Image (spheres, rainbow, N blue to C red):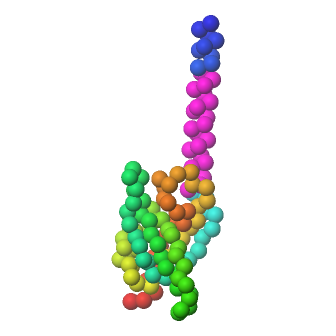
Amino acid sequence: MFSRLNGLLKSVILFIVVLIVLFGLYTWASLNWVYSSGERAGYVQKFSFKGYVCKTWEGEIVLVSMPGTQAEKFVFTVKDAAVAKKVNDSLGKRVKIVYEEHKGIPSSCFGESSYFVQDVLFLEK
């Protein structure tokens, strides 16, 4: 009887370990595999360090294509502290952000957006 329970317990523990490993691999793949990459130009409108437990840098850039047209907002996340400083220094200035999109990230703990900024380039002095 005890050997039967012991075998069942080992099977349950093995199943849980396999699930944890698979979830870890999925998370690693979603954070390292780039779905798309690109650039956006505009004015950084909002940038803040947000979250209760998992704090991330979240921002918003206003894309203005032509004068008199409705502005489009582009929401992004910054993981690197050096890039976050550059974004913070660019508030109110015209910039170009270089980003990568990561699809299927399992939690907002890694960022509220799927767009992660890699670099910021100033377009006006």
Chief SS of the magenta region = helix
> Which quadrant, please, contains the N terminus?
top right
Work out which quarter of the rendered image holds the C terminus and state it.
bottom left
In the image, the segment drawn in magenta is 10-31
**Residue plotted at (59% across, 46% down):** 25
Name the side, left or right, on which 50 lies relative to 40. Answer: left
- Residue 96: in sight, yes or no? no
Residue 32 falls left or right of residue 52:
right
Can the viewer see residue 59? Answer: yes
* Closer to the camera in the image, 115 or 119: 115
User: Where does residue 108 sit, x and y in percent of width and height?
Assistant: 50, 55
Determine the residue positioned at 51% across, 65% down: 116
Residue 28 in magenta?
Answer: yes
Q: Position of residue 64 (x, y in %)?
A: 52, 85
Q: Position of residue 87 (x, y in %)?
A: 40, 74
| Front-lying residue, 69 or 49 | 69
Q: Residue at x 53, y 92 (%)?
A: 68
Query: Which residue extends farthest bottom?
Result: 67
Please tell me whether residue 106 is drawn above or below residue 40 in the rendered image.
above
Left or right of 86 on screen, residue 106:
right
Q: Is residue 19 left or right of residue 92?
A: right
Residue 59 lies in what quarter of the image? bottom left
**Above or below, comparing residue 13 to residue 46 in the picture:** above
Q: Is residue 76 magenta?
A: no
The mark total stands at 0
Residue 115: image x %, image y %? 54, 66
Residue at 59% over, 14% down = 6
